[in-house]
Structures are given as C-alpha cells and as structure tokens.
Amino acid sequence: MEITVTIDGKEVRMRASALIPRLYRYKFGRDVVADMNNLRKAYDKAQNEEGFLSALDLEVFEDIAWVMIRHAGEDIPDSPEEWLDSIDGVFSVYEILPVILELWGANFKTTSSPKKK
C-alpha cells in the first residue's frame, strides 16, 4: 500500500508492505511491530492528554518514516540522520504520524476469509 504526504513542501510517497519489518530490523535491529504499537500508544496518549511524544518516540517515528519513504523508491539520503538534515524547513510529526499509522494499519487488513471445514 502506498500513500503520498507533503514534507518540506514536497510530495513524498510512503509505502508499507510485508517487507517493512525485514527492512526495519536490518537497518535498526528493532522490531517494527513492537515499535509501531508503542508509537501508537504514545501518540494516542499525547492526543488525549495534550502531551508530547518523547525523544525516543520521535526517533522511532523518524526511522519508520525514512524506511517507508525509501521503500516507496523515493530518492532520499542513505540514513534517517542525513534525510532529516536535508530537509530545509520543518514538518509536523502530528500531521505525518497519523498517516503512517493509517498506512501501517491498512497493510494488515486482508481480503481473504478462512475456509469452513
């Protein structure tokens, strides 16, 4: 599944597929499913309690965004740090994160149904 977002005034494609967990684990040595679950909880808490995401939550967000953008074939730098440094302006985590969460959730939906025995 693919979606387009605007970052730094530019349209950027993001892609989620079954390959994301492997790409993420290879690059960061972490489990993307666990990180996405924790990120969703932190985002929901920040929205409901008018709080903020922690520095760790922001790092996970940046890493996941970078992997999804690279997976879509966008021409961005080879690391999240270089990518973030290449952005001239700022972008709202609170605008992009819901899109990532939606994209990730849609990736888990299935159109198949179990067969009856």
Image (cartoon, helix red, strand yellow):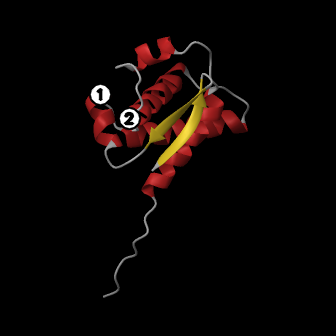
Q: Residue at x 43, y 28 (%)?
A: 66
Mark 1 secondary-structure assignment: helix
Q: Pick whichever, 71 or 21, lies toward us.
A: 71
Q: Which residue is mark 2?
A: 73
> Is residue 102 shown above or below 92?
below
Q: Residue at x 34, y 20 (%)?
A: 78
Choose mark 1 or mark 2, whichever is in front. 2
Q: Amino acid at mark 2?
A: Gly
Q: Pick whichever, 40 or 83, lies toward us.
A: 83
Q: Which residue is mark 1?
A: 27
Q: Residue at x 60, y 31 (%)?
A: 6
Q: Residues within 10 Å of mark 1 (few under 14, many from 20)?
A: few
Q: Amino acid at mark 1?
A: Lys
Q: Residue at x 58, y 41 (%)?
A: 99
Q: Tell me where residue 51 sits by quadrant.
A: top right
**Extreme residue toward the bottom, this view:** 117
Q: Residues within 10 Å of mark 2 (few under 14, many from 20)?
A: few
Question: Distance from label 1 to label 2 (Cα)?
Answer: 16 Å
Q: Tell me where residue 114 sits by quadrant.
A: bottom left
> Is residue 103 shown above or below 89?
below
Quick one: quadrant of the C terminus?
A: bottom left
Q: Please state if 114 lies on the left or on the right of 22 as rendered.
A: right
